[in-house]
Image (spheres, grey):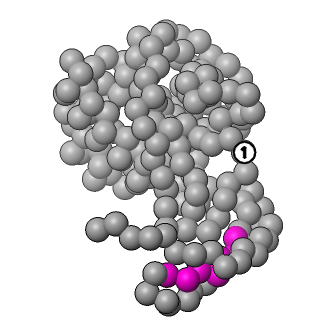
Amino acid sequence: MSRRLPVIHGVTEHEAGPYRLERLDLEFSNGERRQFQRLHGRGHGAVIVVPLLDDDTVLLVREYAAGMHRYELGLVKGRIDAGETALQAADRELKEEAGYGARSLIELRALSLAPTYMSHQAQLVIARDLYPERLPGDEPEELERVPWKLDALHELILREDFSEGRSIAALFITREWLRNHQ
């Protein structure tokens, strides 16, 4: 079903740390009025990188996750800096976090985090043909690198220390993409 987007009668903005909080005064096509809130990130976006050691093995990193106060396995990810493309940011983050560069980078699609209240999106990038190269990053400690076979994805997604939804989605998308682009 295709619906007309709600009419925005007003927007109030508030500063919220790294985000801008907007309160929207909305009117839906059925005449109902509601107040919604949304967060807009500051900056130029983000990347999630799936580094492939080969077509069967992804390279994960383990880093401190302040939100959960534990070490969490996940994919390489980070901000896109001003003047960078998503592919340039992916290669830089890969070098900073995992100590590898990539000769082949493929931008697959955007992933949203919580589209009902956030505008944030991250570009999913597959990195192939890796070679060792390290750049200094902003991590306070070197990240542990953990190779993982894609055919053991069913085990990975049940681990307590692998919980980030974007990483889970990115690995399933990558596995399906690989099956169709071999």
Residue 139, by quadrant, is top right
Secondary structure mostly taken by the magenta-highlighted segment of the chain: strand
Residue 115: image location, x then y, percent: 49, 61
| Residue drawn 77% across the image and 71% down it | 13
Q: Quadrant of residue 16?
A: bottom right
Q: Inspect the magenta stretch and tell me whether residue 88 lies in it.
A: no
Q: Height in image: 110 above or below 7?
A: above
Q: How crowded is mark 1: few (under 14 residues within 10 Å), some or many (20 or more)?
A: few
- The range drawn in magenta is 22-28
Side (left or right) of 150 relative to 33 = left
Q: Nearer the viewer, residue 13 or 169?
A: 13
Q: Helix or strand or loop: what does disc 1 sit on?
A: loop
**Residue at point 62% right, 16% down?**
134
12 or 126: nearer the eye?
Answer: 12
Residue at 42% in and 38% down: 109
Q: Can residue 75 be seen in this view?
A: no
